[in-house]
Image (cartoon, grey):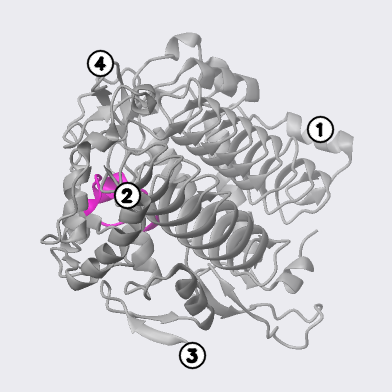
Amino acid sequence: MNSETKICQNCKNNFIIELDDFSFYEKIKVPLPTFCFECRTMRRIQFRNERSLYHFTCGICGKKGITMYHQNSSFPIYCINCWYSDNWDPLSFGLKYDFSKSFFEQLKELNQKVPRPNLFNRNCLNSEYSNIIGESKNLYLSFSVNNSENIFFCKSIDRSKDVFDSLSLINSNLCYENIRGENNYNSSFLILCRNCIDSSFLFDCIDCQNCFCSVGLRNKKYVFNNIQLNEKEYKEKIKTFDFGSFRNIQKTKEEFENIMKKFPRKYAQIIKSTSSTGDELSNAKNAKMSFDAYNIENTKNIFRCYGSKDCYEGNNIADCELIYEFSGGGANNSYNLLFANNGLKNLRNVFYSDFCASSSDLFGCTSLKSNQFCILNRQYTKEEYEELVPKIIKHMNDMPYIDSKGRIYKYGEFFPSELSPFCYNETIAQEYFPLTKEQALNQGYKWKDKEERNYEIDIYNKDIPDNIKDITDDIIGKVIECNHKGTCNQQCTEAFKIIPEELQFYKRMNLPLPHLCPNCRHYERLAQRNPMKLWHRSCMCDKTTHIHQGKCQVEFETSYAPERPEIIYCEKCYQQEVY
């Protein structure tokens, strides 16, 4: 059997089904995809809203709180405690399968009735303003966080404590503005750094301590602007730098960016991995087109995944096996989970389902907990279930769902975008594949117009004191103008407030107040990450001091596009450049 080229029914571009893919599709008994990788990802993550939060009132207890669903949603919204309780029965919404309608029409009808939990919050304390979180406490406006404590304004944080304004961080403590890091402590403004302590403004540094404004360091101490100093010289230098001044920090950021531009970059951040392609990978085996993942095996087209194997087309997966076309929620300790969303935990043999937990043998179900042999939230016996499911699959192929743009959805395709309870720009699709309103509507996606905001500004951006030493406690709760003032494409809230824990952290770390709202700060961090896409390129090194003769001939797959200005090296050439 050879690889096969297909035409994506969405973007009309060619994509390839590789030889190794056929065995996986055969193993899970699904047909070949009809959307390309990029369009499959874009469709799938339209079902994952992390940051767009609204006020709501629980449909059972009447408690007011925060939810990821807009108040115009057709289905009831329950607080997480009521949703988990026995005060309601999700099977009471069950539908008998109707072979005169397409499967997705019936699933849409079910989803418009079944209650949803206000947020994805699994065993968390004091974290009412965060979403897609598990086994954590004291989180605020943070998303996709696991086993962590005191996390504020962050995304994708695992096993960390006392972290503010960071992205993709593991096993770290007392950090600010860290992007893609691990095992860092008491450090600020780090990018692609591991095992760094008491340092600031570092790029791709490992095992460093007391270093400042440097790139490509390995096992170093007391380096300032990539110049090696002794301990006394370094401490005298760092003592003159005013970390508490916003103007000083901004100036240093610009200088730091200029330093980074001049230094070569490794084609990908792949650590302790074999036969793997993608970026931000560690302890991976046979992982293809995989991003932001660790401790994985036999994966393809996945991101934000750990402790899993045999997973294709998924995001936010933890400790799972045999997953295909899954979006959101972790689905911890699940097996054979196909075409699903928001899997909470312990799912087995579950298909086309949303917000289900501790269940098995489900097809087209929503909000079930500890159930088995259900179709469209209707209970069946084991024999009835096993007889009906093959008939439904055949019916999905004989009577497919066709959306408003003529895209065809048979068995084997993820939910149509039209079934998402969210608008395109409410979801992480806008983070990874940003569109304008016109582009989204032209592709058949829903769009949420900006709501009128009538903030009464207490402190205009130009009037924010420059230095943290000049900030008093009375700034807490004041409405501060965001410097973007809603003119950007970053979901700007136009204004923000400082909370007590935040001010305490800035004073402890001697850092100035931010001048952007949390959403704009988040998008600024996202801009420093590469896209989830690979290009075939060659090493750009032509140094005569390296082991190759003439220009290096090593080729690789990299997330740095050819038109980008960075100097991209293969691993061996890069290793000869680091200090």
Disc 1 and disc 2 in contact, CB within 8 angstroms = no
Instruction: State the residue position of label 3.
Output: 2
**Cα–Cα gap, marks 4 and 2:** 26 Å
Instruction: State the residue position of label 4.
Output: 62
What residue do we see at 37% from left, 16% from top?
478
**Cα–Cα gap, marks 1 and 2:** 50 Å
Q: Position of residue 23 (x, y in %)?
A: 51, 77
Tell me the mark number nearer the camera, choosing from 4 and 2: 4
Quick one: which residue is furthest to the bottom in this view? Answer: 2
Answer with left or right where residue 2 lies relative to residue 574. left
Tell me the magenta residue range. Answer: 419-436
Instruction: State the residue position of label 2.
Output: 47
Category of crowding for the residue at label 4, using alpha-carbon neighbours closer than 10 angstroms: few (below 14), some (14–19), many (at least 20): few
The answer to whether residue 298 is above or below residue 495 is below
Amino acid on which disc 1 is placed: Lys
Instruction: State the residue position of label 1.
Output: 235
The answer to whether residue 354 is above or below residue 536 is above
What residue do we see at 21% from left, 67% from top?
395
Answer with left or right where residue 42 lies relative to residue 252. left
Answer with left or right where residue 254 lies relative to residue 390. right
Category of crowding for the residue at label 2, using alpha-carbon neighbours closer than 10 angstroms: few (below 14), some (14–19), many (at least 20): many
